[in-house]
């Protein structure tokens, strides 16, 4: 089954393809002739996922889905949250975001945080939402080379390594995105029966 994934993030694409498995072929916006940045101007993860998926659906008329993800840090009242990509700068500067996060957590004892992913699927014009959450904590220095974004700072509950110290399979098994995508797969499989 071919399905469009409304993302420009190559890391996400490979994580999602790995969870979907061989039964699904992911198509990128670029492969459908959509070259521009897809707008993300809502104030919630649900709103942004929905906006991205609807944007692509209106452009192509084909079934598609989008994910929006945020890191929600308890001691920072849920920040960076929906602003995770542009926390420190206007761009997707992972290193600057991580530096700012560490600075804002300096001296704070509560390091609890969670990643939350919301997927919006538009299927035959109807929207369906799927959520995935992983709880964990933020350490005080970057560790590991794998993954992307805040992965070098985030240790999921039950582990003593960051996501950036895990293989893609290990991260997907417990991650926010892995959990949300497995719900999406369950839904799509049920529809195929
Ligand atoms: P698209 O909108 O093109 O899909 P994006 O990079 O803008 O890609 P999001 O808005 O969903 O993706 O993510 C916001 C930021 O949250 C992202 O830039 C990363 O810094 C961070 N992030 C998202 N998923 C992550 C993950 O699995 N591990 C670590 N950081 C992540």
Image: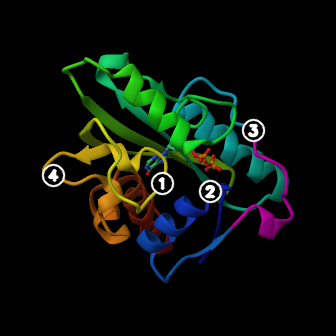
- Upstream in sequence: badge 3 or badge 4: 3
Side (left or right) of 122 relative to 61? left
Asked whether mark 2 and ligand 1 are closer than 8 Å, the reply comes as yes
Q: Please state the horizontal and vertical placement of residue 47, each as a whole percent of the image.
A: 60, 31
The magenta segment is 28-39
- Upstream in sequence: badge 4 or badge 1: 1
Q: Secondary structure at mark 1?
A: loop
Mark 2 in CB contact with mark 1 (< 8 angstroms): yes
Give the distance between the C-alpha atoms of the residues marked 3 and 4, in whole angstroms.
37 Å
**Quadrant location, the C terminus:** bottom left
Asked whether mark 1 and ligand 1 are closer than 8 Å, the reply comes as yes
Density class for disc 3 (Cα within 10 Å; few <14, some 14-19, many ≥20) is few
Mark 2 in CB contact with mark 3 (< 8 angstroms): no
Residue 172 lies in quadrant:
bottom left
Res 148 label: 1
Q: Please state the horizontal and vertical placement of residue 66, each as a whole percent of the image.
A: 60, 51
Res 160 label: 4
């Amino acid at each position: 089954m071919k399905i469009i994934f409304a993302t420009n993030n190559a890391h996400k694409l490979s994580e999602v393809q790995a969870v979907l498995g061989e039964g699904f072929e992911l198509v990128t916006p670029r492969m459908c002739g959509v070259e521009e940045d897809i707008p993300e101007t809502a104030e919630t993860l649900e709103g942004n996922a929905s906006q991205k998926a609807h944007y692509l659906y209106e452009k192509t008329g084909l079934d598609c889905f989008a994910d929006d993800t945020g890191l929600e840090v308890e001691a920072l009242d849920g920040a960076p949250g929906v602003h995770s990509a542009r926390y420190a700068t206007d761009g997707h500067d992972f290193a600057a975001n991580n530096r700012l996060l560490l600075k804002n957590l300096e001296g704070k004892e509560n390091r609890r945080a969670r990643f939350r992913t919301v997927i919006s699927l538009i299927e035959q014009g109807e929207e369906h939402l799927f959520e995935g959450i992983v709880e964990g904590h933020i350490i005080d220095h970057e560790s590991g080379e794998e993954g992307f974004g805040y992965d070098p700072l985030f240790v999921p509950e039950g582990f003593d390594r960051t996501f950036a110290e895990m293989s893609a399979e290990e991260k997907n098994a417990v991650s926010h995105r892995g959990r949300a995508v497995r719900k999406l797969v369950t839904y799509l499989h049920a529809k195929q029966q």
